[in-house]
Amino acid sequence: MIELWNSLPVLIQILLKITAIILPLLGLVAYYTYAERKVIGYMQVRIGPNRVGWRGLLQPIADAVKLLMKEIVIPTKADKTLFLLAPMIAIAPALAVWAVFPFDEGLVLADINAGLLYILALSSLGVYGIIIAGWASNSKYALLGALRSAAQMVAYEIAMGFALVGVLVAAGSLNLGDIVMAQQGNLFTWFWLPLLPLFGVYLISGVAETNRAPFDVAEGESEIVAGFHVEYSGMAFAVFFLAEYANMVLISALTALLFLGGWLSPLPAGWIEANWLLGDGFHWLLLKTFFFMFLFLWLRATFPRYRYDQIMRLGWKVFIPITIVWILVVALAVVYRLPPWWSA
Amino acid sequence: MAEKFLFYVFALITVWASVMVITRKNPVHSVLFLVLAFVTSAALWVLLEAEFLGIVLILVYVGAVMVLFLFVVMMLDVDLAALRAGFVQNLPLAGLVAAVMAVEILLIVGPGNFGLDAFPKPEPLGVEVSNTRELGLLLYTVYIYPVEIAAVILLLAIVAAIRLTLRRRPDNKAVDPAQQVRVRKGVDRVRLVKMAAEDVAPAAVDKGDTQ
């Protein structure tokens, strides 16, 4: 088996690896939409989808088939090229980011030194899909949604970037694998504790970056119908949807990786030898990611939409000062080797 | 070989996108082509093993500066006909300026200053050398004064821009969030009033009887 793998050309090997990442990811995204409808359904004392398949488990597939069959309507006087290009621009960075994501020790497609920067740079490109969609649609609602989203994403990207600067100072590396290994120890040596304010800022900025409730003013269906994708139908709309959910999965996985020790096991060292399930491994990363993915749905079912000026205030006047102060604190702690995190 | 091929692909896209930036009629298209030119330039830098610079170019220019640019351009109500009205009569002067600038650029960016003699091909560094670390060390030791001067100039620009646009508006009804948060339940928001029960409306009583 290994000989057969090694005999393949490198390009084919890389393509196969990409497929092995993207296919499960898209499956996860499809069933995330199902989970969202179920979870929010139960939170609102409803049952959620339960007609297609056992307990509605085939619902995402039925949705996909329905959307594939639908006509893609292009509005009059819309910029046709950009209109069709926008969904692709939205989803491409959401998928390309996974190239540097480590799933276990050494299990990564491209183990580059500047992994954290790469992720930050690519996730900052996601906003183009939204802006271009809003402008190319030739619709007032879409343009309003796009402008709101642009202002919001630029504001929260700064807070998010500063939170990541804190992580990089604490870990002393931009390589995602090294960042996880720097958190080794136990539950309390993970970065969530020494970087607690940054952890909070990162998580909330992540919700704002993905334009999810309570920061979903870019869609704001009660004010501007559906915001930037109001004119989209069929598969073009579905691609926007996929991009949004892929981004949510990414933010969840990154939070788990950067602040909760990724694939590291929270259990004490003695237990780890007892069973491989208790030791470090991909399943821990998955568990932590699922927790944050659930948090996204929980937040949506709990909070009403933020007012626009309050979103801006939170981003610029609260989060950015917090992150700047805490970067200083972390830098001092690293320089003076504050135990137990930086004692070595 | 593959590197050379990639270089030509990205270089050609960069040149093409740059030409499109100045020839498109719609300013939004121009901005988007400028974004494309930035992205391919970043790819060229990555080919030169300057991956930190390449990624930061995307992060700062594409991810933030151009988004705000696009933001402004989309809000402009551009009158395309008015923009092109003086094209013919301005052409000679514009052509002259363009020619002078082209000559200047050619004088500087010629093989004399940038050839292999002036800049011999650098030794490729090993994978263990971290671009980010080396740049950081240089910036905060050897080049600390230029960095600080640049930082102060940027701060000055921020303060000036805010001062120029900041104005008090008397009709502004914004509420101080700190005050909003400090609201006391049952005192500032809702007032409970005790009152005697009113008589039931006669019509309702009639209906109740017939049932």
Image (cartoon, coloured by chain):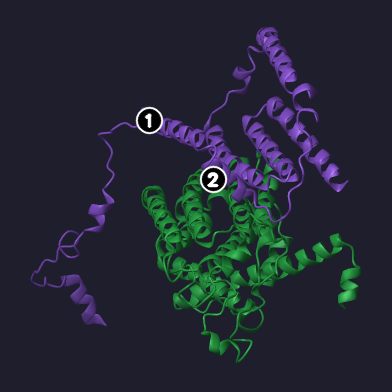
Chain colours: A green, B purple
Quarter where residue B53 is shown: top right
Does dot 1 land on a helix, a strand or a loop? helix
Q: Local crowd at mark 1 within 10 Å, few (<14), some, or many (≥20)?
A: few
- Residue in the foreground of this view, choosing between A83 and A92: A92
A37 sits left or right of A341 in the view: right
Residue A340, percent from left and from top: 44, 71
**Mark number displayed over residue A146:** 2
Residue A140, percent from left and from top: 53, 41
Quadrant (top left/top right/bottom left/bottom right) for the N terminus of chain A: bottom right
Does dot 2 land on a helix, a strand or a loop? helix
Q: Local crowd at mark 2 within 10 Å, few (<14), some, or many (≥20)?
A: many
Quarter where residue B9 is shown: top right
Q: Residue at x 64, y 74 (%)?
A: A59
**Mark number displayed over residue B98:** none
Residue B51, percent from left and from top: 68, 47
- Residue in the foreground of this view, choosing between A60 and A210: A210
Q: Is residue B178 above or below residue B207?
A: above
What count of labels does the image hold?
2
Which residue position holds label 1? B165
A189 sits left or right of B46 in the view: left
B64 sits left or right of A214 in the view: right
Residue A301, percent from left and from top: 45, 69
Q: Callout 2: residue from which chain?
A: A
Quarter where residue A82 is shown: top right
- Residue in the foreground of this view, choosing between B67 and A241: B67
Res. B207 in view: yes
Q: Amino acid at mark 2?
A: Ala
Q: CA distance from mark 2 to mark 1?
A: 24 Å
Q: Is residue B205 above or below residue A198?
A: below
Q: Callout 1: residue from which chain?
A: B
Q: Is residue A19 above or below residue B64?
A: below
Q: Amino acid at mark 1?
A: Thr
